[in-house]
Image: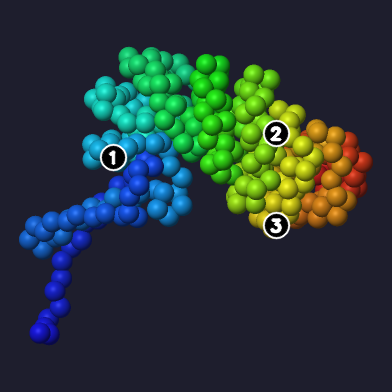
Amino acid sequence: MEYDVPLACDLQLEVNYNTSTVAAPPWSAYGKRNGSTIFSAVEVHTGAKGVPHIFTEKGGRRQECFTLDRRLHNVSSVREFERILAQGMQSFDPGNTVNAFALAAKLVEDASLSALKACPHWDSFYGQVVDCVGRLEPRGLSMVAYASAKLGLADENLLASLAQVGIQRAQDFGAMDIAKIAWAFAKFDFVDKASEFWEAMADRVPDKVHDGKMNDVSMIAWSFATAEVGPESMYREITTASLRMLDELPPQSLSNLVWAHASMQLAPDEGAVHVVCQRAKTLIKDFVEFDVANMCWALATLGFVDYELFDLLAEH
């Protein structure tokens, strides 16, 4: 039967992200109707479309945890953050805990813990962060490490736990995961006490770096060079991955690439250095002092001085 007048209704769609690794279909949905409005909810399991998992949870997440994630997403102040800890922290699953910890780092951009430590529930919450590490997948591990570095929270016990679990999960690390956790460890100079972890990550870089975005590749180059680890073959793969996205690279990525080679006393291909310099010449106005210093020092150290580029940077 056909109708001449089309039916009309309002649709309200709610999307929940399941961050656990429980086996599940790509999505599940439920809905209800109230008058002319249809309310529908969809649960998206992050692993279904290749989105990395934060943690492992048998049986899936509770609906309450999705609600907590939404509340965390809307937090914009330390006071609101403390309110959620007070009201919902006892119901946090590892996904909520990691998301809340990452949020805390964003709320205090100056890397000062004073405002957070003043929160009555901070110590208990941080205990939950430490306790959940063993259940985290690479994405969760990297998020915790990255947030710790942004907060300036150099807890060697936490870092050691992240490194230990990271070794066990090494095969599942992606480019972004390697970039963030390596960056955090390098920031804290957590190298000698995590040598096995760095070796495990260095083994993964050649395969995974080609899947990374420009920021991931740049962070990997800087982190491993800062930690002074990684074989020459790994840095060659980093260079190859960088050159494939050369037209997208900003000054920081360009300077990090040559700086990493200079720091490790590795001689990159002359052709690679040439195209990096040519790209840099088109971005002079975007260079900041830090990038200028690293670029000039690296090129001078490597013996690849591009006088035209040096003149342009000097004028800038």
Give above or below for 209 relative to 245: above
Q: Amino acid at mark 2?
A: Phe
- The residue drawn where x is 67% and y is 39% is 203
Q: Position of residue 154 (x, y in %)?
A: 55, 18
For badge 3, the amino acid type reads Arg
Q: Residue at x 35, y 43 (%)?
A: 22
Mark 1, residue position? 59
Around disc 1, counting alpha carbons within 10 Å, would you say few (fewer than 14), some (14 to 19), or many (20 or more)?
few
* Label 2, label 3: how far apart the Cα atoms are: 20 Å
Q: Nearer the viewer, mark 3 or mark 1?
A: 1
| In-front residue for pair 315/200 | 200
When the figure is inspected, residue 249 is found, relative to residue 165, above or below; the finding is: below
Between 306 and 1, the residue placed more toward the observer is: 1
Q: Position of residue 15 (x, y in %)?
A: 29, 51
Answer yes or no: is residue 149 visible: no
Q: Earlier in the sequence, mark 2 or mark 3?
A: 2
Sequence-first tag of 3 and 1:
1
Q: Quadrant of residue 54?
A: top left
Residue at the far left in the pictured view: 35
Q: Which mark is residue 87?
A: none
Residue at mark 2: 224
Residue at the image point whose x is 60% and y is 49% from the top: 212
SS at circle 1: loop
In the picture, the quarter occupied by the N terminus is bottom left
Q: Which residue is under mark 3?
A: 244
Side (left or right) of 157 relative to 286: left
